[in-house]
Image (spheres, rainbow, N blue to C red):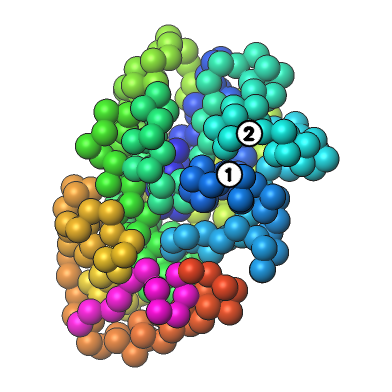
Protein backbone atom coordinates (compact mmCIF):
# COMPACT_ATOMS: atom_id res chain seq x y z
CA UNK A 1 0.00 0.00 0.00
CA UNK A 2 1.27 3.45 -0.81
CA UNK A 3 0.74 6.84 -2.38
CA UNK A 4 1.57 10.36 -1.39
CA UNK A 5 1.96 11.00 2.35
CA UNK A 6 -1.09 12.61 4.00
CA UNK A 7 -3.66 10.78 1.88
CA UNK A 8 -5.22 8.72 4.67
CA UNK A 9 -3.26 5.51 4.08
CA UNK A 10 -2.48 5.27 7.80
CA UNK A 11 -6.19 5.46 8.62
CA UNK A 12 -6.97 2.77 6.05
CA UNK A 13 -4.24 0.36 7.08
CA UNK A 14 -5.32 0.59 10.73
CA UNK A 15 -8.88 -0.25 9.69
CA UNK A 16 -7.66 -3.26 7.71
CA UNK A 17 -5.43 -4.39 10.57
CA UNK A 18 -8.59 -5.14 12.58
CA UNK A 19 -9.50 -7.87 10.09
CA UNK A 20 -9.00 -11.37 11.54
CA UNK A 21 -6.94 -12.43 8.51
CA UNK A 22 -4.76 -9.32 8.02
CA UNK A 23 -1.49 -8.34 9.68
CA UNK A 24 -0.24 -4.79 9.06
CA UNK A 25 2.88 -3.62 10.89
CA UNK A 26 4.79 -0.37 10.93
CA UNK A 27 6.36 1.16 7.83
CA UNK A 28 9.50 -0.69 6.72
CA UNK A 29 10.47 0.90 3.35
CA UNK A 30 11.42 -2.63 2.29
CA UNK A 31 9.86 -2.08 -1.14
CA UNK A 32 11.47 1.30 -1.72
CA UNK A 33 14.72 -0.21 -3.00
CA UNK A 34 14.19 -2.33 -6.11
CA UNK A 35 17.97 -2.87 -6.23
CA UNK A 36 17.36 -5.50 -3.57
CA UNK A 37 15.04 -7.41 -5.88
CA UNK A 38 17.23 -7.00 -8.96
CA UNK A 39 20.59 -7.84 -7.38
CA UNK A 40 20.04 -9.34 -3.95
CA UNK A 41 23.49 -10.90 -3.60
CA UNK A 42 25.17 -7.51 -4.13
CA UNK A 43 22.93 -5.30 -2.04
CA UNK A 44 21.70 -7.52 0.79
CA UNK A 45 24.77 -6.76 2.94
CA UNK A 46 23.65 -3.10 2.97
CA UNK A 47 20.04 -3.80 3.92
CA UNK A 48 20.31 -2.75 7.57
CA UNK A 49 22.77 0.07 6.94
CA UNK A 50 21.32 3.58 7.29
CA UNK A 51 24.64 5.43 6.97
CA UNK A 52 25.40 8.19 4.47
CA UNK A 53 27.92 6.16 2.48
CA UNK A 54 26.73 2.54 2.55
CA UNK A 55 23.07 3.04 3.33
CA UNK A 56 20.70 2.20 0.47
CA UNK A 57 19.40 5.48 -0.96
CA UNK A 58 15.87 6.19 -2.05
CA UNK A 59 15.88 6.32 -5.86
CA UNK A 60 13.12 8.90 -6.17
CA UNK A 61 11.58 11.95 -4.44
CA UNK A 62 11.78 10.57 -0.91
CA UNK A 63 15.04 11.01 1.00
CA UNK A 64 15.64 7.97 3.19
CA UNK A 65 18.49 5.55 3.84
CA UNK A 66 17.96 1.84 4.34
CA UNK A 67 14.94 0.11 5.86
CA UNK A 68 13.20 -0.13 9.24
CA UNK A 69 12.89 -3.81 10.13
CA UNK A 70 13.84 -3.81 13.82
CA UNK A 71 10.37 -3.15 15.15
CA UNK A 72 8.37 -5.00 17.79
CA UNK A 73 5.52 -5.33 15.28
CA UNK A 74 7.55 -7.86 13.32
CA UNK A 75 9.34 -9.60 16.19
CA UNK A 76 12.88 -9.74 14.82
CA UNK A 77 16.09 -8.78 16.61
CA UNK A 78 18.99 -7.30 14.68
CA UNK A 79 21.05 -10.45 15.16
CA UNK A 80 18.21 -12.61 13.83
CA UNK A 81 17.76 -10.31 10.84
CA UNK A 82 21.46 -10.46 10.02
CA UNK A 83 21.31 -14.24 10.06
CA UNK A 84 18.14 -14.29 7.93
CA UNK A 85 19.71 -11.94 5.38
CA UNK A 86 22.81 -14.11 5.18
CA UNK A 87 20.84 -17.33 4.75
CA UNK A 88 18.27 -16.00 2.25
CA UNK A 89 19.27 -16.84 -1.31
CA UNK A 90 16.86 -14.35 -2.91
CA UNK A 91 15.01 -11.17 -2.03
CA UNK A 92 11.68 -12.97 -2.41
CA UNK A 93 12.69 -15.68 0.07
CA UNK A 94 13.81 -13.03 2.55
CA UNK A 95 10.51 -11.14 2.28
CA UNK A 96 8.48 -14.34 2.71
CA UNK A 97 10.47 -15.35 5.80
CA UNK A 98 10.38 -11.87 7.30
CA UNK A 99 6.59 -11.62 7.21
CA UNK A 100 6.02 -15.29 8.08
CA UNK A 101 7.00 -14.67 11.71
CA UNK A 102 4.33 -12.06 12.58
CA UNK A 103 1.74 -13.98 10.54
CA UNK A 104 2.38 -17.12 12.56
CA UNK A 105 2.56 -15.24 15.86
CA UNK A 106 -0.77 -13.46 15.30
CA UNK A 107 -2.46 -16.37 13.48
CA UNK A 108 -3.01 -14.27 10.35
CA UNK A 109 -2.82 -15.28 6.69
CA UNK A 110 -2.28 -12.02 4.78
CA UNK A 111 0.20 -9.21 5.34
CA UNK A 112 -0.04 -5.59 4.20
CA UNK A 113 2.97 -3.29 4.24
CA UNK A 114 2.10 0.40 4.10
CA UNK A 115 4.88 2.84 3.32
CA UNK A 116 3.86 5.87 1.20
CA UNK A 117 7.03 5.54 -0.90
CA UNK A 118 5.95 2.03 -1.99
CA UNK A 119 4.12 3.93 -4.72
CA UNK A 120 7.41 4.67 -6.48
CA UNK A 121 7.78 0.98 -7.39
CA UNK A 122 4.17 -0.20 -7.74
CA UNK A 123 4.54 -0.94 -11.43
CA UNK A 124 7.83 -2.79 -10.98
CA UNK A 125 6.61 -5.16 -8.24
CA UNK A 126 3.07 -5.59 -9.56
CA UNK A 127 4.28 -6.64 -13.02
CA UNK A 128 6.80 -9.13 -11.67
CA UNK A 129 4.55 -10.57 -8.98
CA UNK A 130 1.01 -10.95 -10.38
CA UNK A 131 -0.16 -12.61 -7.15
CA UNK A 132 0.83 -9.49 -5.21
CA UNK A 133 -1.74 -6.70 -4.96
CA UNK A 134 -0.90 -3.00 -4.78
CA UNK A 135 -3.23 -0.40 -3.26
CA UNK A 136 -2.92 3.29 -4.05
CA UNK A 137 -4.59 5.69 -1.61
CA UNK A 138 -5.40 9.06 -3.16
CA UNK A 139 -6.73 12.37 -1.85
CA UNK A 140 -7.37 15.73 -3.45
CA UNK A 141 -3.80 16.87 -4.21
CA UNK A 142 -4.49 20.37 -2.92
CA UNK A 143 -5.59 18.98 0.45
CA UNK A 144 -2.64 16.57 0.45
CA UNK A 145 -0.12 19.34 -0.22
CA UNK A 146 -1.77 21.59 2.36
CA UNK A 147 -1.30 18.89 4.99
CA UNK A 148 2.35 18.37 4.00
CA UNK A 149 2.87 22.14 4.01
CA UNK A 150 1.51 22.44 7.53
CA UNK A 151 3.84 19.65 8.61
CA UNK A 152 6.75 22.03 7.98
CA UNK A 153 7.61 21.35 4.33
CA UNK A 154 7.94 24.17 1.83
CA UNK A 155 5.43 24.57 -1.01
CA UNK A 156 7.71 23.16 -3.73
CA UNK A 157 8.49 19.98 -1.78
CA UNK A 158 4.85 19.53 -0.67
CA UNK A 159 3.48 19.76 -4.21
CA UNK A 160 6.32 17.75 -5.73
CA UNK A 161 6.13 14.90 -3.23
CA UNK A 162 2.40 14.61 -3.86
CA UNK A 163 2.62 14.71 -7.66
CA UNK A 164 5.65 12.44 -7.97
CA UNK A 165 4.15 9.69 -5.79
CA UNK A 166 0.80 9.80 -7.59
CA UNK A 167 2.36 9.75 -11.05
CA UNK A 168 4.54 6.76 -10.25
CA UNK A 169 1.68 4.83 -8.64
CA UNK A 170 -0.73 5.59 -11.48
CA UNK A 171 1.68 3.95 -13.92
CA UNK A 172 0.40 0.63 -12.55
CA UNK A 173 -3.29 1.53 -12.94
CA UNK A 174 -3.73 -0.66 -16.04
CA UNK A 175 -2.76 -3.83 -14.14
CA UNK A 176 -5.37 -6.21 -12.74
CA UNK A 177 -3.61 -6.41 -9.37
CA UNK A 178 -3.78 -2.62 -8.84
CA UNK A 179 -6.50 -0.97 -6.73
CA UNK A 180 -7.20 2.70 -6.04
CA UNK A 181 -9.22 4.09 -3.14
CA UNK A 182 -9.81 7.76 -2.38
CA UNK A 183 -9.72 9.30 1.07
CA UNK A 184 -12.89 11.25 0.34
CA UNK A 185 -14.84 8.12 -0.59
CA UNK A 186 -13.46 6.26 2.43
CA UNK A 187 -14.59 8.82 5.01
CA UNK A 188 -17.96 9.45 3.33
CA UNK A 189 -18.89 5.79 2.78
CA UNK A 190 -16.47 3.74 4.90
CA UNK A 191 -18.46 0.51 5.06
CA UNK A 192 -18.99 0.36 1.30
CA UNK A 193 -15.40 1.32 0.41
CA UNK A 194 -13.81 -1.12 2.87
CA UNK A 195 -16.09 -3.90 1.64
CA UNK A 196 -15.07 -3.29 -2.00
CA UNK A 197 -11.39 -3.31 -1.04
CA UNK A 198 -11.75 -6.56 0.90
CA UNK A 199 -13.48 -8.13 -2.12
CA UNK A 200 -10.48 -7.11 -4.25
CA UNK A 201 -8.23 -8.77 -1.65
CA UNK A 202 -10.37 -11.94 -1.73
CA UNK A 203 -11.08 -11.63 1.99
CA UNK A 204 -14.26 -11.90 4.02
CA UNK A 205 -16.38 -8.75 4.10
CA UNK A 206 -18.60 -10.02 6.91
CA UNK A 207 -16.62 -8.21 9.63
CA UNK A 208 -16.94 -4.88 11.42
CA UNK A 209 -13.68 -3.01 11.06
CA UNK A 210 -14.82 0.58 11.52
CA UNK A 211 -14.84 0.89 15.29
CA UNK A 212 -11.42 1.43 16.89
CA UNK A 213 -10.59 -0.63 19.94
CA UNK A 214 -10.00 0.93 23.36
CA UNK A 215 -6.27 0.26 22.94
CA UNK A 216 -6.25 2.11 19.61
CA UNK A 217 -8.11 5.10 21.02
CA UNK A 218 -5.53 5.34 23.79
CA UNK A 219 -2.70 5.34 21.22
CA UNK A 220 -2.79 8.83 19.77
CA UNK A 221 -0.79 9.19 16.55
CA UNK A 222 -1.25 12.65 15.08
CA UNK A 223 1.46 14.57 13.24
CA UNK A 224 1.51 18.38 13.01
CA UNK A 225 -0.96 19.44 10.33
CA UNK A 226 -3.19 16.38 10.76
CA UNK A 227 -6.84 16.91 11.67
CA UNK A 228 -7.37 13.41 13.07
CA UNK A 229 -5.76 10.67 15.15
CA UNK A 230 -4.95 7.86 12.70
CA UNK A 231 -6.13 5.29 15.26
CA UNK A 232 -9.35 7.15 16.08
CA UNK A 233 -12.84 7.30 14.64
CA UNK A 234 -13.33 8.19 10.98
CA UNK A 235 -13.99 11.90 10.45
CA UNK A 236 -14.61 14.17 7.46
CA UNK A 237 -13.06 17.43 8.66
CA UNK A 238 -9.85 16.89 6.65
CA UNK A 239 -11.82 17.19 3.40
CA UNK A 240 -11.20 20.72 2.17
CA UNK A 241 -7.95 21.09 4.13
CA UNK A 242 -6.60 23.39 1.42
CA UNK A 243 -9.40 25.90 1.97
CA UNK A 244 -8.29 26.37 5.57
CA UNK A 245 -4.98 27.88 4.45
CA UNK A 246 -4.45 31.62 4.14
CA UNK A 247 -5.15 32.98 0.61
CA UNK A 248 -1.44 33.69 0.01
CA UNK A 249 -0.55 30.14 1.06
CA UNK A 250 -3.15 28.73 -1.33
CA UNK A 251 -1.75 30.80 -4.20
CA UNK A 252 1.80 29.66 -3.44
CA UNK A 253 0.81 25.98 -3.43
CA UNK A 254 -1.19 26.35 -6.64
CA UNK A 255 1.87 27.97 -8.23
CA UNK A 256 4.08 25.13 -7.02
CA UNK A 257 1.73 22.62 -8.67
CA UNK A 258 1.58 24.69 -11.86
CA UNK A 259 5.37 24.91 -12.06
CA UNK A 260 5.98 21.16 -11.69
CA UNK A 261 7.24 19.01 -14.56
CA UNK A 262 8.66 15.59 -13.78
CA UNK A 263 12.10 14.71 -15.12
CA UNK A 264 11.49 12.34 -18.05
CA UNK A 265 14.03 9.91 -16.57
CA UNK A 266 11.59 9.27 -13.70
CA UNK A 267 8.31 9.39 -15.60
CA UNK A 268 7.09 5.82 -16.09
CA UNK A 269 4.24 7.22 -18.17
CA UNK A 270 5.11 10.15 -20.48
CA UNK A 271 1.53 11.41 -20.15
CA UNK A 272 1.90 11.85 -16.38
CA UNK A 273 4.54 14.53 -16.03
CA UNK A 274 2.65 17.74 -15.22
CA UNK A 275 0.17 18.67 -12.52
CA UNK A 276 -2.64 19.05 -15.03
CA UNK A 277 -2.05 15.53 -16.39
CA UNK A 278 -1.80 13.97 -12.94
CA UNK A 279 -4.88 15.80 -11.56
CA UNK A 280 -6.83 14.64 -14.59
CA UNK A 281 -5.78 11.01 -14.12
CA UNK A 282 -6.78 11.22 -10.44
CA UNK A 283 -10.09 12.87 -11.43
CA UNK A 284 -9.66 15.98 -9.29
CA UNK A 285 -10.17 19.56 -10.48
CA UNK A 286 -6.99 21.42 -11.39
CA UNK A 287 -6.73 25.20 -10.97
CA UNK A 288 -3.62 26.71 -12.58
CA UNK A 289 -1.81 29.65 -11.02
CA UNK A 290 0.69 32.08 -12.52
CA UNK A 291 4.16 30.91 -11.52
CA UNK A 292 6.02 34.14 -12.23
CA UNK A 293 5.15 35.97 -8.94
CA UNK A 294 6.50 32.97 -7.01
CA UNK A 295 9.37 31.86 -9.22
CA UNK A 296 12.10 33.14 -6.86
CA UNK A 297 10.59 31.32 -3.87
CA UNK A 298 10.13 28.11 -5.84
CA UNK A 299 13.60 28.16 -7.43
CA UNK A 300 15.16 28.75 -4.01
CA UNK A 301 13.21 25.82 -2.52
CA UNK A 302 14.16 23.57 -5.42
CA UNK A 303 17.85 24.48 -5.07
CA UNK A 304 17.68 23.81 -1.33
CA UNK A 305 16.17 20.37 -1.90
CA UNK A 306 18.66 19.59 -4.66
CA UNK A 307 21.55 20.43 -2.34
CA UNK A 308 20.06 18.34 0.47
CA UNK A 309 20.09 15.35 -1.89
CA UNK A 310 23.54 16.08 -3.31
CA UNK A 311 25.49 16.29 -0.07
CA UNK A 312 23.77 13.12 1.16
CA UNK A 313 24.93 11.33 -2.01
CA UNK A 314 21.48 10.68 -3.44
CA UNK A 315 21.15 9.71 -7.11
CA UNK A 316 18.42 12.37 -7.34
CA UNK A 317 20.83 15.19 -6.53
CA UNK A 318 22.68 17.58 -8.80
CA UNK A 319 22.22 16.73 -12.48
CA UNK A 320 19.49 14.14 -11.95
CA UNK A 321 16.84 16.01 -9.96
CA UNK A 322 13.32 14.51 -10.22
CA UNK A 323 11.48 17.62 -11.49
CA UNK A 324 11.88 20.94 -13.28
CA UNK A 325 10.23 24.30 -12.72
CA UNK A 326 8.43 25.58 -15.80
CA UNK A 327 6.93 29.07 -16.10
Residue 323 within the segment the image draws in magenta: yes
Magenta run includes residue 116 = no
Q: Nearer the viewer, residue 296 or 311?
A: 311
- In the image, residue 206 above or below residue 218: above
Q: Are marks 1 and 2 in contact (CB under 8 Å)?
A: yes
Q: Find disc 2 in the rendering and name its residue.
A: 89
What residue is shown at x 64% (from left), y 23% (from top)? 100
Q: Nearer the viewer, residue 72 or 190?
A: 72
Q: What residue is at 33 percent from the left and 47 percent from the top? A: 169
Mark 2 element type: loop
Query: Label 1's element?
Result: helix
Residue at image coords 30%, 85%: 294
- Image quarter of residue 81: top right
| Left or right placement of residue 264 versus residue 246 in this view | left
Quarter holding the N terminus is: top left
- Residue highlighted by disc 1: 40
Q: Which mark is residue 147?
A: none
Q: Quadrant of the C terminus?
A: bottom left
Amino acid sequence: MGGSPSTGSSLLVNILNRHPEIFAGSETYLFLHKDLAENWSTYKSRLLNTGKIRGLKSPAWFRFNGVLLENDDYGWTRQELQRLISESQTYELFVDAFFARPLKRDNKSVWIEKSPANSFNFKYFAERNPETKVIQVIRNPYDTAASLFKRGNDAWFSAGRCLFANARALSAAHLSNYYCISYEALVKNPEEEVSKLLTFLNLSTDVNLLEPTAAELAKVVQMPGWQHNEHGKIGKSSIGRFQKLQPEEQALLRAAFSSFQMNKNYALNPDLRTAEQIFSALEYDYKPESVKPFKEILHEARAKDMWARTWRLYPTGLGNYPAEIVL
